[in-house]
Amino acid sequence: MQSAFDEIINREHTGSVKHTLRSGESGVIPMWVADMDFRVPEQVTEALAAVARHGIFGYTDPDESYDHMVCGWYRRNFGWEAKPEWNIRTPGVVFSIACTIRALTSEGDSVLIQQPVYYPFMEIIRDNGRRIVVNELRFDGGKYEIDFADFEGKIKANRVKLFILCSPHNPVGRVWTKDELSRMGEICLKHGVYVISDEIHSDFVFSGHRHTVFADVSPALANITITCTSPMKTFNLAGLQTANIFIVDAKLWSVFLKEYRKTGYAFLNTAGLAATKAAYLHGQSWRDELIAYLEENVACLRMSLAETNGVVKLTPPEGTYLMWLDCRRLMMSDTELNRFFIKKAKLKLHKGVTFGKSGSGFMRMNIACPKSTIERAVGNLKNAIKEAGV
């Protein structure tokens, strides 16, 4: 059956970061930046059209129905009873993480991350004059796990003040269990560590797995957590820049808001607010169909990579649309590996080493695209491997 997600949409010459290729990348399939090659739900398009027809784009502050709409989404999908008064609307998750770092730590303080992980975490810690402390995830060749002894040891040895949790995890695709979240949380409580929980990929969870909101694990954890959410990934709205940051503890809420106000940012994007409301009100069936389609893409990718005899292996994804490919059997340096994918396989992926040194030998692939693109991409890769004689 033909799906709306099968449509090939030309994004060239639209300013798309993902589809803007450099010299020498002609004919390369872009599968790197984390946005989707799918149109947004029709109701979102209609909401944006209504804003455009109105013709006035002045400062916009949504009424209380906006926050109730957002909270309703998290109640229906995750059983989390978030309250509207916990929400602080911001222009983005990374923006909010930077605000939190400045609000809860001082220059020279240590901030913990779990590599390989979303690389802007490192950039904003470093750019704000804080120390990066790494709890490396353990990989047994099939699944990434948390080294809890190292997690606590790094917190104690470095007097860590803040932990940035990526849940679900980008790029390794883990959907942390409630037990894993609880164990990390208990360690943070024990040592007085605040937690930023980046849950922007929470809507992308595959069959057999369930996303648990970190702040919903226990009331104690809720009081030390800044929960970062956004419809931007789920509904492909990244360019509209809207995020919803939930903070339960009143003092923590005030500390964050004070730092946020220092940025001079006061009102969100008018179109982004309208799109968010429409997405959370009308987008449930679209999102459910999207997950089913992505699962088919995963199956297609897994089956095709099996034909490389393990030269390139798919780390089994539990969530997100970002696949973590183990390419270490190609026996190439990271520079050579990137050149191989671009020049030989005609694929632009994200270099694994970008996400930390433990990402060396891996590549991140975005599969939020039509199935025909997946088939073409894997065909390119198999031919490149065959030509390389690996």
Image (cartoon, helix red, strand yellow):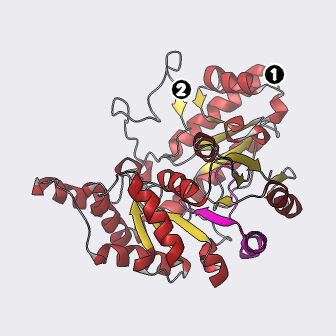
What residue is shown at x 61% (from left), y 49% (from top)? 322
| Rendering coords of residue 4 (x, y %) | 39, 54
Q: Which mark is residue 389?
A: 1
- Give how far across and how far down residue 317 sits, in percent: 69, 56
Region in magenta:
170-199
What amino acid is found at the position of numbered circle 2 in the picture? Val
**In front of the other: label 2 or label 1?**
2
Q: Is residue 179 magenta?
A: yes
Residue 129, x across and y down, in percent:
62, 43
Left or right position of 112 against 234? right
Q: What separation in Å lies between label 2 and label 1 (alpha carbons)?
A: 22 Å
SS for tag 2?
A: loop
Q: Residue at x 67, y 60 (%)?
A: 162
Q: Is residue 241 left or right of residue 299?
A: left
Q: Pointer 2: what residue?
A: 28
| Cβ atoms at labels 2 and 1 below 8 Å apart | no
Does the image show residue 351? yes
Q: Which mark is residue 345?
A: none
Tell me if residue 224 is in the magenta stretch. no
Vertical arrangement, residue 332 with respect to residue 16, above or below: above
Image quadrant holding the N terminus, namely: bottom left
Q: Is residue 294 above or below residue 130?
A: below
Crowd rating for badge 2 (residues with CA inside 10 Å; few <14, some 14–19, many 20+): many
Closer-to-camera residue (373/80):
80
Q: Which residue: 71% across, 23% down?
A: 335
**What amino acid is found at the position of numbered circle 1 in the picture?**
Gly
Where is residue 178 shown, x and y percent of the image?
Answer: 71, 75
Give the position of the C terminus as an image quadrant.
Answer: top right
Q: Is residue 244 visible?
A: no
Q: Residues within 10 Å of mark 1 (few under 14, many from 20)?
A: few
